Image (cartoon, rainbow, N blue to C red):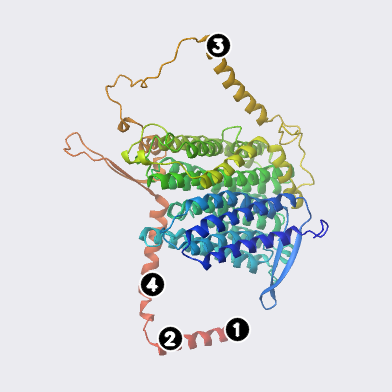
């Protein structure tokens, strides 16, 4: 094929079909672990790399469309590739490449689902997410969305023999389908009475402001449920820990971003010109979600639940940025709208690398120790140095420390918030800058959580004797961790190049003609004429120079001989692992400061107890006050109409006949 005839859209479709084909090959020998680990998962990683490469190369090219002659009669599937879908295709391909190569060394025999079937579910999950990003009509979008939900459900319930995992899978599927219904209704509103469900028809439809607001609200509910916005978040801390670690990485690092893609597509593309006050809703929900997620993360003692709540925090940051972009665009401040949108896209890519790296690191720890409880870990940096140092990169990145990638996107979002006082709406322009303080608080608490996460797992002394048998990750697992860690470093050191590509999205969406920046390849100024600037390479050089100079000066002026000895024990005769800070101890100040967030039950000993017992059970108020009451109400309604179930076919035929008569009467 010549360069002129090369079609990135066809290439993307071919790669997504290749993923499905790789999964189907697993059924040839469903019990063969070697086939899945040594052949199919590495092939899946190669497809991910190719997809990421195609997405980067074609991001500046004009949008492409294609109609597939499959689907329902008179309802073919429409596909479209543009700059927005390219960003998320890159995210999908690049993150899945590292996760898949890690999975090639991670999965073992006898872990629930048969290896070949697991391979099919995994690669169908990848392919369905890709088709969600390429869909250009409601039918194709919803088919891909449902395939994504079902394949991920089976991955979450890989260990389906455990009742708690089956319950987590049911909750995930239930909320996923509630969200899907809201998305479907949103598409129904956006077609505007034309009964044409292609995205082109929705773009050209003229909606009354009220109906446009209804469509946006339904989309926000549907995609917010998939993303884990509070109070629709309850499935996320249950499903992520239940799934195998590579699947958890895909769920958090990639799948949550398909919900972000959906709300961006609906708001800035299909609806066209959002009204400014729409943005206040995702800003409020996003800020509350960010604080809620990070506070609960600080209180967790299970390392995978901690990361799951951390994902809720980052989803809150992303939706806050979406809301800010809507406000700016609605009042005509297009440059700041573009800046907020670029910050959202940048943080989505960053989070895919950071959180995937952290989940894979916990997977290696789980395999090496058999423990998820932070209270039974510790000192693993000596036995798992590869995993420890690479996980540290992810922890520093997600804590928002320069010069890694997490700092850049959060800094860009803060710059947009600090300009919110210019919004020409009274009272709103006073409240919006307060969002910068909330984002800064969430970032500070995220750093606190990462100190707890990394310190309790890898530093100090082992809290259990069995940890002496822990071993480092294999070479395939290390390769996956290295790929994701390298992404965190590269995205942090070269932000101007990344922003230059991301700036194409607001241009293609018609938000702004061009992004006015005054950046060089090493120096970032997000908007020309503003005082804020950032030079990550200079920052890195300063850190390295400080370390080198310090070591050199010590070596030059301190000539005494060194001797090795035991560390100072603070005057204690014996210092053991029980004297270290625990996960509960790290979370105790946060539990007291944010007491109203928790549904907490404590069992405290008294000085007179012969067998003192201390126990803290932390629950979710939303689960108790909303979901349990709703479940009880549904159960009562079901019991009240249970008499309809007669168990007789004649009765059911009568119900069908009566329903048919009623429908005919309504239609005619």
The residue labelled by disc 1 is: 667
In 3D space, how far apart are the residues under numbered discs 1 and 3 (Cα atoms)? Answer: 93 Å
Quadrant where the N terminus is found in the figure: bottom right
Mark sitting earlier along the chain (1/3): 3
Residue 223's spot in the image, x, y percent?
A: 57, 57
Q: Secondary structure at mark 1?
A: helix
Q: Could you tell which of marks 3 and 2 lies nearer the N-terminus?
A: 3
- What is the distance, in whole Å, between disc 1 and disc 2 at their CAs? 23 Å
Q: Nearer the N terminus, badge 4 or badge 1?
A: 4
Q: Where residue 621 sits in the image (x, y, percent)? A: 40, 50
Q: CA distance from mark 3 to mark 2?
A: 92 Å
Marks 2 and 4 sit apart, C-alpha to C-alpha, by: 17 Å
- Of the pair 447 and 225, the residue shown nearer to us: 447
Residue that mark 4 sits on: 638
Q: Residue at x 46, y 34 (%)?
A: 451
Q: Nearer the viewer, residue 287 or 369?
A: 369
Front residue of this view, candidates 305 and 263: 305
Which residue is label 3 attached to? 556
> Is the C-beta separation of discs 4 and 1 under 8 Å?
no
Q: Residue at x 73, y 62 (%)?
A: 10
Name the mark on residue 652.
Answer: 2
């Amino acid at each position: 094929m010549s360069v002129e005839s090369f079609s990135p859209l066809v290439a993307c479709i071919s790669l997504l079909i290749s993923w499905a084909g790789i999964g189907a090959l697993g059924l040839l020998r469903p019990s063969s672990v070697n086939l899945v680990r040594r052949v199919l998962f590495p092939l899946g990683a190669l497809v991910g790399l190719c997809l990421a490469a195609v997405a980067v190369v074609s991001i500046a090219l004009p949008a492409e469309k294609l109609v597939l002659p499959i689907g329902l009669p008179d309802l073919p599937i429409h596909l479209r590739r543009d700059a927005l879908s390219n960003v998320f295709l890159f995210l999908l391909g690049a993150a899945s490449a590292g996760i898949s190569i890690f999975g090639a060394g991670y999965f073992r025999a006898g872990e629930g689902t048969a290896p070949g079937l697991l391979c099919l579910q995994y690669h169908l999950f990848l392919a369905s997410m890709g088709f969600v990003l390429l869909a250009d009509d409601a039918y194709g979008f919803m088919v891909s969305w449902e395939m994504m939900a079902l394949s991920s459900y089976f991955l979450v319930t890989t260990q389906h023999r455990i009742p708690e995992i089956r319950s987590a899978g049911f909750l995930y599927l239930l909320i996923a389908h509630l969200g899907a219904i809201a998305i479907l209704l949103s598409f129904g509103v956006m077609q505007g009475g034309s009964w044409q469900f292609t995205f082109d028809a929705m773009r050209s439809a003229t909606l009354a402001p009220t109906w446009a607001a209804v469509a946006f609200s339904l989309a926000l509910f549907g995609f917010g449920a998939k993303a884990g916005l509070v109070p629709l978040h309850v499935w996320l801390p249950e499903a992520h820990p239940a799934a195998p670690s590579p699947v958890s990485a895909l769920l958090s690092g990639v799948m949550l971003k398909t919900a972000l893609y959906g709300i961006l597509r609906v708001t800035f593309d299909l609806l066209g010109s959002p009204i400014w006050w729409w943005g206040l809703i995702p800003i409020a929900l996003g800020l509350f979600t960010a604080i809620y997620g990070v506070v609960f993360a600080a209180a967790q003692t299970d390392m995978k639940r901690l990361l799951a709540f951390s994902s809720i925090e980052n989803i809150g940051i992303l939706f806050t940025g979406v809301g800010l972009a809507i406000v700016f665009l609605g009042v005509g401040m297009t440059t700041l709208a573009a800046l907020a949108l670029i910050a959202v896209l940048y943080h989505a890519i960053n989070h895919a690398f950071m959180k995937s790296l952290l989940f894979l690191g916990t997977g290696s720890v789980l395999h090496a120790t058999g423990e998820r409880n932070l209270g039974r870990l510790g000192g693993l940096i000596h036995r798992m140095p590869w995993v420890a140092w690479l996980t540290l990169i992810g922890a520093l990145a997600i804590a928002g420390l320069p010069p890694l990638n997490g700092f850049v996107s959060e800094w860009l979002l803060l710059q947009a918030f600090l300009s919110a006082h210019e919004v020409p709406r009274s009272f709103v322009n006073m409240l919006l800058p307060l969002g910068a303080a909330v984002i800064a608080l969430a970032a500070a608490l995220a750093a606190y959580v990462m100190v707890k996460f990394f310190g309790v797992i890898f530093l100090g002394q082992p809290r259990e004797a069995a940890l002496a048998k822990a071993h480092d990750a294999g070479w395939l697992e290390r390769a996956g961790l290295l790929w994701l860690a390298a992404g965190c470093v590269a995205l942090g050191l070269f932000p101007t190049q990344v922003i230059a590509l991301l700036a194409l999205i607001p241009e293609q969406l018609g938000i702004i003609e061009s992004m006015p920046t005054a950046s060089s390849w090493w120096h970032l100024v997000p908007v020309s004429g503003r005082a804020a600037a950032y030079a990550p390479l200079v920052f890195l050089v300063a850190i390295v120079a400080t370390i080198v100079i310090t070591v050199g000066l010590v070596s030059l002026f301190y000539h005494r001989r060194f001797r090795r000895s035991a560390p100072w024990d603070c005057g204690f005769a014996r210092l053991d692992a029980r004297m270290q800070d625990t996960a509960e101890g790290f979370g105790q100040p946060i539990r007291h400061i944010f007491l109203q967030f928790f549904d907490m039950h404590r069992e405290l000993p008294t000085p007179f107890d012969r067998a003192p017992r201390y126990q803290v059970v932390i629950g979710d108020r939303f689960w108790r006050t909303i979901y349990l009451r709703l479940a009880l109400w549904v159960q009562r309604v079901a019991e009240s109409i249970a008499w309809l179930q007669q168990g007789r076919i004649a009765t059911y035929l009568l119900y069908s006949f009566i329903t048919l008569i009623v429908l005919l009467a309504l239609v005619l």
